[in-house]
Amino acid sequence: MIDGIWWLVILLAVVAILWFVAHLRGKVESSAHNDPQSTIKKTSPNDALQKTAVILQRHFPSYRVTRRSNHLLLVKQDKKIAMITIDKNIAVGQRRLGEVPIINYHRVPNRAQLSASLQFVE
C-alpha cells in the first residue's frame, strides 16, 4: 500500500502539471486576443452603443440607461421602457420582446430620431 507522503507527492505533481498546462493555454489564448483585426470587429458595434448611451443620458435624463453587450435597456420609474440595438443585419424599426419594444437602428441615431421613437413607445 502507498504511504501518505507518496499520496501527497502524487497530488502535488498532478497540480503542478495542470497548472503548467493552464499557463501554456493562457498564453496561446491571450495572443489570439491581441489580433488587431479581431478587436476592430468587436469594438465597432460597442462604440455606436456607447455614443447612443451618451446621447440618451445627456438629452433624456428621466431615463436610466443600462448597457448590455448587444443592446441598451431604457428604464423609467423602475419600468422597462425599451431596448435599443444597433445591428445592420436587422431591419430598421421596432419589434416586441414580451412587453418591451425593441428599437433597432443601423447607425447611431440623432436626438430627433430618439425623441420620436421614445414618444411612440410611451
Image (cartoon, helix red, strand yellow):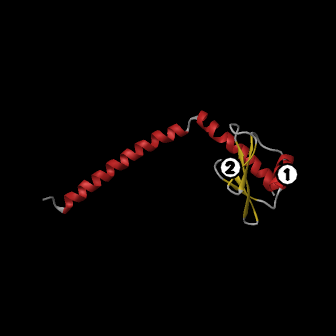
Residue flagged by tag 1: what amino acid is it?
Ser
Q: Is residue 67 left or right of residue 121?
A: left
Q: Which mark is residue 71?
A: 2
Residue that appears at 82% across and 55% down: 58
- Quadrant containing the C terminus is bottom right
Q: Position of residue 74 (x, y in %)?
A: 74, 57
> Residue at point 85% right, 51% down?
115
Q: Secondary structure at mark 1?
A: helix
Using the image, tell me which numbered label, if any, was put on residue 104: none
Compared to 1, does 103 lie above or below?
above
Real-space CA distance between mark 2 and mark 1, rounded to the nearest whole angstrom: 18 Å
Circle 2: residue type = His
Q: Nearer the viewer, residue 53 or 101?
A: 101
Check the picture and name the quadrant holding the N terminus. Answer: bottom left
Above or below residue 45? Residue 99 is: below
Q: Residue at x 41, y 42 (%)?
A: 24
Residue 80 drawn at (x, y percent): 72, 60
- The answer to whether the residue labelled 2 contacts the one labelled 1, judged by CB atoms less than 8 Å apart, is no
* Residue bearing the label numbered 1: 115
Of the image marks 2 and 1, the number of the one nearer the N terminus: 2
Residue closer to the observer: 100 or 71: 100
The spot of residue 17 in percent (x, y) is: 32, 48
User: Quick one: label 2, few (<14), some, or many (20+) residues within 10 Å?
Assistant: many
- x and y percent of residue 59 in the render? 84, 54
Q: Residue furthest bottom?
A: 77
